[in-house]
Amino acid sequence: MDDFAARYFRARKQSEPFDWARRNLAEEATHDARRTVPWRYAILRMHEPVEGLVEQMSDADRARFEASLKPVFVDNYAAVPPESIRRLLALHDAGLLSIRAIGSDWTMQQSDEGTTLDTAAGPLTFEVFVDARGQKPLEADDLPFPTLRASLLTAGVDVLDVDEDYRLLGAPAYDARVYMGAIPYLMHDRPFVQGITAACDIGTRIGGAVLREALETSRRRRGRVRWEDFRPRLPRSLARLADPVPDVAAG
């Protein structure tokens, strides 16, 4: 299993990138024909249960996972949309787009003149440079909020932990009082939590928790809360998550 990623990517690395893209795009036609490509679908569905195992892995197993299965899963579920591939091929065919391999040993220098990548094959300079490598996991030390960051670091927290409603845990002054929905800080234990679908799920969960908390606070302050006063204002997905009981009376 440790060499699975190497075998999975071998044929692609040995092919001319745009030739591979054309062949790969041809498989996309099966979508219109409503025909599933079995190996693609198997990998796509497999990454979901595997994600639930990641936080239980030892450091050694996590390192093996990062080097073997994770690149394959990411390559599958985060694939470039077919329409974008068609555009890239059109640019290439028009002589406006090329690919340069830079390997893993390189550095980036930015200045007013542009961006220069220093690679083993020599420097590459661009007037406009877009870094589209995607999000990377962030830790407590990366938080832009000084007091919250200090609270976590003083408590010895490097990797942020949240409960089922994404309330931040481990910060003594803020424990369960701050909601953490920023995807880069969640990627340590959930390496596939990316994209608008995940963002929607996280936002819906947090929204439901905030509404439940607001209802409970109102119940304690006013003694009685009519749920009907809240429900009409909510999107349907949030209303389901926040739905407690039709009428809440103080005890």
Image (cartoon, helix red, strand yellow):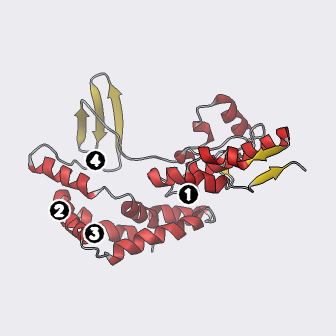
- The residue that mark 1 highlights is 190
Mark 3 vs 4, N-terminal side: 3
Residue closest to the far right = 251
Which one is closest to the eye, mark 3 or mark 4? 3
Which comes sooner in the sequence, label 2 or label 4? 2
Q: Which residue lies under the disc numbered 3?
A: 31
Which element carries disc 4, helix, strand or loop? Answer: loop
Residue to which mark 2 is pinned: 22
Q: Is residue 50 above or below residue 116?
A: below
Residue in front for this viewpoint, 251 or 67: 251
Looking at the image, is mark 1 or mark 2 earlier in the sequence?
A: 2
Labelled pair 3, 2 in contact (Cβ < 8 Å)? no
First-in-chain label (4 vs 1): 4
Q: Which residue: 24% across, 54% down?
A: 83
As drawn, is 102 to the left or to the right of 69?
Answer: left
Q: In the image shown, does 6 or 79 lie closer to the viewer? A: 79
Secondary element under disc 2, as helix, strand or loop, is: helix
Discs 4/1, front = 1
Check whether the beta carbons of the residues at disc 1 and disc 2 lie within 8 A of each other.
Answer: no
Residue that sits furthest to the top in the current view = 112
Residue at 62 percent across and 41 percent down: it is 140
Quadrant containing the N terminus in the rendered view: bottom left
Kind of residue indicated by mark 3: His
Residue type, numbered disc 1: Arg
Depicted 244 relative to depicted 219: above or below: below
- Per the image, the residue denoted by label 4 is 102
Residue 170 visible to an observer of this rendering: no
> Taking 45 as reference, is 101 left or right?
left
Q: Position of residue 193 (x, y in %)?
A: 51, 55
Identity, as a three-letter code, of the amino acid under mark 2: Arg
Say which label, 3 or 2, has the lower sequence index.
2
For image coordinates 84% across by 42% down, the residue present is 220
